[in-house]
Amino acid sequence: MDLLHRRAAAAPVRPRPATLLAGQRLITDPWNGSRTMAALLAAVIAGSVALGYKALLATTFRFYDLSNQVQGFTNGEGIGAGAEPSFYFNAIRLVMVAVGLSAAVAAAGLLIALVESIVARRRAYASLTATGVPRRTLSAAILWQTVTPLIPALLLALAVGDALVRLFPTNFDLGNAYQECLADHNPEAHCTTLAAVHAPAVLTVPIPWGDLGWLGGSTLLAVLVAVGAGLLVLRSSTDLDELRAG
C-alpha cells in the first residue's frame, strides 16, 4: 500500500494521480472491503484445492493403469480395478460449480461494498472534481485501490490451495510394481518392462498451471466486472450539488 503511494509520488516523468490517490486511500483505510475479499479468496483456495486434487487423482489412476500393464493384468484385474475415474472427476466438477457460485456471490458483495464506499465518500469525490480532478482519474484510483491488494492475495491463495494437496504423497514409484511382478514367481505372469509401456520410473503429480491460471483469471475478471459496475455510480457521486447539499 505504502509502496504504491511512494512509487506514484516518485514517478520520474510525471506524477501519477490515480495511483497516488489509491495508495493514500489504502494507507488511510487498509481493511476496506476486507470481508468480501476474504470470502472471495476462500473460494479461490477451495477451487485450487479441488484442481490440485484433480491432478492428484489423474496421476493416481495413470499409476494404476501403468502398474497393471507392467504386471500383466489385462482383464480388469489388478490395483484400483474397481475404481471409476468418472465418478471422482464428476464430483470435482460439482465442487468447481459450487466454487464458481461462491466466487460470484463474493464478487457481488464486493460490488455492494464498493458502491457503499463511493456513496459514503461522495462529498470527497465531489470536492476533488471541483478542484479539477477528472472522473477518469478517480475511476482509475478506485480500480487501483481494489486490484492492488487483490493480485498478490490471489496468487497466495492459489499457491496455498495447491500446497495443501501436496501434503499427500505426490510421487508414485512404478519400479516397485515391476519388481513385485518379478518376485511373484507366477508362471502365468507376463511382466512388462517400463520401457515397453513407455512409462517413467516415477510418476509425479504436476502442478495444474493451466487450471490454476484459469481460476485466477476468472476471479480477477469477476472483480474487474464488479468494479466496472460499481463505477457507474461515480458520476452521480461527483456531482457538484453534493457540495451544496452539505
Image (spheres, helix red, strand yellow):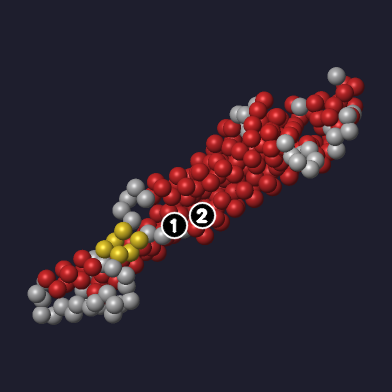
Q: Is residue 216 above or below residue 73?
A: above
Horizontal side of 56 relative to 177 (left or right) equals: right
Q: Tell me, for residue 212, which label it has, or none.
A: 2
Location of mark 1 (residue): 207
Q: Position of residue 11 (x, y in %)?
A: 74, 39
Q: Earlier in the sequence, mark 2 or mark 1?
A: 1
Which amino acid type is shown beneath numbered disc 2?
Leu
Q: Position of residue 82 (x, y in %)?
A: 27, 65
- In percent of the image, x 49 and y 58: which residue is there? 209
Q: Position of residue 222 (x, y in %)?
A: 64, 48
Report helix, strand or loop for mark 2.
helix
- In percent of the image, x 87 and y 23: which residue is there? 243
The reply to whether residue 211 is in sight is: yes
- In percent of the image, x 81 and y 30: which residue is there? 125
- In percent of the image, x 38 and y 63: which residue is there? 58
Report helix, strand or loop for mark 1.
loop
Toward which corner of the image does residue 17 lie, by quadrant? Answer: top right
Q: Residue furthest front?
A: 12
Q: Position of residue 199 (x, y in %)?
A: 32, 72
Which amino acid type is shown beneath numbered disc 1?
Ile
Q: Badge 2: how crowded within 10 Å, few (<14), some, or many (20+)?
A: many
Q: Badge 1: how crowded within 10 Å, few (<14), some, or many (20+)?
A: some
